[in-house]
Amino acid sequence: MLKLSQHQKLMMKLTPQQVQYLKLLQLPLLSLEQRIKAELEQNPLLEEGADDEMENLQEEPTEEPPLEASEEVEGVIRTEPEEDKYTFEDFMNDELNGYKTYYEPAPDEDTKDEMPMPADVALTQKLLDQIRLLDFTDEEILIAEEIIGNIDEDGYLRRPLENIIEDLNLSRDLNITKEQAEKVLFQVQRIDPPGIAARNLQECLIAQLEVSEFDAKLKALAEKILREHFEHFTMKHFEELSRLLEINIDKLKQVLELIQKLNPKPGEGYITQQQNYIVPDFIIEHDNDDIIINLNDRNVPPLRVNKAYKEMMSRRKKNSVNVETKDFIRKRFEAAKWFIASIHQRRDTMMKVMHAIVDRQRAFFDTGENLKPMIYKDIAQMIGMDISTISRVVNNKYVQNEYGVYELRYFFSDKISTASGEDMANKEVKKKIKILIESESPDKPYSDDEISKILKEDGMFVARRTVAKYREQLRIPIARMRRKI
């Protein structure tokens, strides 16, 4: 039996325009530039350039259309016009919640020319050039090229050699044996940089050692350690190594110092500047006691709606445009205006969040230290926005000041209680732990428990497990692995 009932339900819906704004908000600078280029290609009504004509194109003024609904979603104002009173000509001249139908970035008076980047050759190309100088057959060159193509960014060959051989034999109809591939791999590992294409750390260090020009006796001892006693070496069993090699501790120290000169990541450092360059979204400068916050959007092109399409849809020419064309222009014009408005709103929101962060962390921006505990909720309450909006602004964004380039996430941290009753950011505790470890005795490094006790003596109540967690986040090994002769 059917039954009718009435109930109330609270719902929140996002319009496509609001979704577009939120997506733009979380984009970093370089991604935003690419997104704008894509929109320019897709929408013929959108074009680069500042709007020269600020006057209204409408011949007869019309009243602002009334709004029948308005709701706030994460700082976004949603408005819905009354359909029967909102004419197309009104739509063409509407300024969309106070935003003009063009967007121009803030002027940058101190525009600096970009520094030219030197031409650079990729590591893969350097390796390929070298193998062609070796006494390889055509088949061996194919093996070497396949090996080089599977090297990761650290310079290691992570893919099993058997799989490489199998792929070559199937795709090229060859009959390559593992012995042939091992022979080629051996020679590849000894080109520049030596140790490249190694399958593990031991193989990497041995390859470098063999082509190096160190003292012959020290080199022989180092090779024996790497080949026969590698586990004792990694576990830092110095007394055991001294006994097995029948040398004193001073001699062992010289051998270990020789091994430490080798590079555990032969592929590291070959990333070009273009690939490894962070573009800050904000630039902060000091002007005496004032802090100037700039949004780094000088490479974001100014946007406007194409004037030819505006004139095409003006009242004087409305009879010369068919219905299908008018409908297409209406949709594209709506998309262009909302996109421009979203860029405006993105800029306003980002500046509000950055101003709030600077206000909260003023001591850090003045001195480069004394970071205060701060969470997303603190900023959200300061500027009256939702926590998810703050998260979108902070995600993958960077700020540059005179002390360096920092990810915005860096300024957010939990708090640690101190003996004085004041709260301290956990990043300051991590900094203290790092300083303690750097100043510890090489032959007797601090354990996590000892670090916890030292911090408590300084008024910071940090448990041993918390010290271990912070140490791991700092990528610092345990005490036994930090031990030195």
Image (cartoon, rainbow, N blue to C red):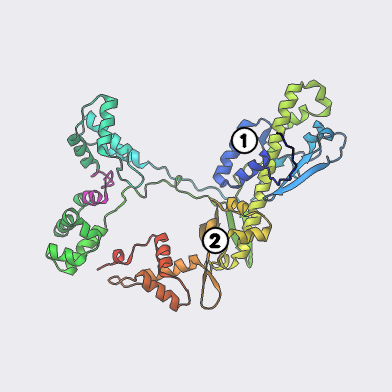
Image side of residue 204 versus residue 84, left or right: left
Residue 17: % across, % down: 68, 40
Q: What residue span does the magenta drawing correspond to? A: 189-207
Q: Which SS class for mark 2?
A: helix
Rendered image quadrant of residue 353: bottom right
Badge 2 or badge 1: first in the primary sequence? 1
In the picture of the structure, the residue carrying the numbered disc 1 is: 39
Q: Magenta region's main secondary structure?
A: loop
- Which marked residue is nearer to the observer: mark 2 or mark 1? 2
| Number of marks drawn | 2
- What residue sits 65% from the left and 31% below the top? 43
When the figure is inspected, residue 389 is found, relative to residue 467, above or below; the finding is above
In the picture of the structure, the residue carrying the numbered disc 2 is: 411
Residue 299: % across, % down: 59, 44
When the figure is inspected, residue 333 is found, relative to residue 274, above or below; the finding is above
Rendered image quadrant of residue 284: bottom right
